[in-house]
Image: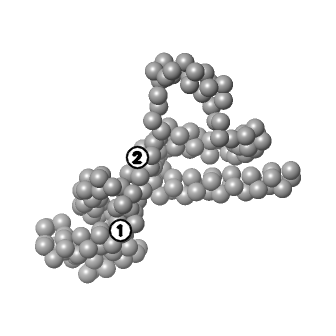
């Protein structure tokens, strides 16, 4: 880590007003694309970001491989993305609480938006990806955050994100191959 960054981190952790103002400015810039989507939850998310930044800097996780501003920018983006994913998790409804005709419709065709050909293609892609990809997708469908998933799989959050990205890329490749084979 560069000496200037180490001094800045120390000043921030000691409560220096100038350091806090600079971090707040970086936070505002990094969070701009997410504020509208987070809506009324934004203030809570901003507080979570501040806590996460303080926790990470206090633990010494910033190693200086990038600028401090870039590091904090990434913390802000990942925290906002995790909150957006958590916000969009499925809301399960018990079939008993639905009217009988709606429950029957769901049970007869759980994915009405997909035609049979698309369902078959999806199943063929899922069958051909690795077991690890299927396991990761199952955790995503469970609604787990990347942090929760990384704890389960015993890898860092960054490594887990890369694995999920590779699985998604492989699935798209397989989909393309299957569509071309026709």
Residue occupying the point 53% across, 40% down: 141
- Which x, y percent locates residue 126? 69, 42
Who is closer to the viewer here, 132 or 181? 181
Tag shown at residue 17? none
Q: Taking 6 as reference, is 33 above or below it?
A: above
- Which x, y percent locates residue 137? 57, 43
Q: Is residue 52 visible?
A: no
Q: CA distance from mark 2 to mark 1?
A: 18 Å
Q: Earlier in the sequence, mark 2 or mark 1?
A: 1
| Left or right, residue 18 beside residue 54 | left
| Left or right, residue 59 beside residue 106 | left
Badge 1 is on which residue?
Answer: 32
Who is closer to the viewer here, 11 or 87? 87
Residue occupying the point 41% across, 73% down: 65
Q: Residues within 10 Å of mark 1 (few under 14, many from 20)?
A: few
Q: Secondary structure at mark 1?
A: helix
- Which x, y percent locates residue 38? 36, 55
Residue occupying the point 47% across, 58% down: 158
Res. 22 image quadrant: bottom left
Q: Taking 128 as reference, is 15 above or below it?
A: below
Q: Residues within 10 Å of mark 2 (few under 14, many from 20)?
A: few
| Left or right, residue 127 beside residue 136 | right
Tag shown at residue 87? 2
């Amino acid at each position: 880590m560069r000496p200037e960054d180490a001094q800045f981190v120390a000043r921030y952790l000691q409560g220096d007003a100038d350091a806090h103002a600079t971090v707040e400015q970086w936070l505002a810039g990094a969070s701009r694309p997410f504020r509208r989507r987070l809506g009324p939850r934004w203030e809570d998310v901003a507080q979570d970001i501040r806590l996460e930044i303080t926790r990470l800097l206090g633990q010494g996780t910033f190693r200086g491989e990038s600028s401090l501003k870039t590091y904090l920018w990434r913390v802000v983006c990942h925290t906002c993305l995790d909150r957006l994913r958590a916000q969009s998790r499925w809301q399960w409804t018990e079939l008993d609480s639905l009217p009988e005709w709606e429950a029957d419709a769901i049970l007869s065709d759980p994915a009405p938006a997909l035609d049979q050909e698309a369902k078959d293609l999806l199943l063929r892609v899922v069958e051909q990806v690795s077991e690890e990809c299927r396991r990761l997708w199952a955790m995503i469908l469970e609604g787990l955050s990347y942090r929760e998933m990384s704890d389960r799989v015993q890898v860092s959050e960054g490594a887990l994100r890369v694995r999920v990205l590779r699985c998604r890329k492989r699935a798209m490749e397989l989909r393309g191959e299957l569509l071309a084979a026709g």
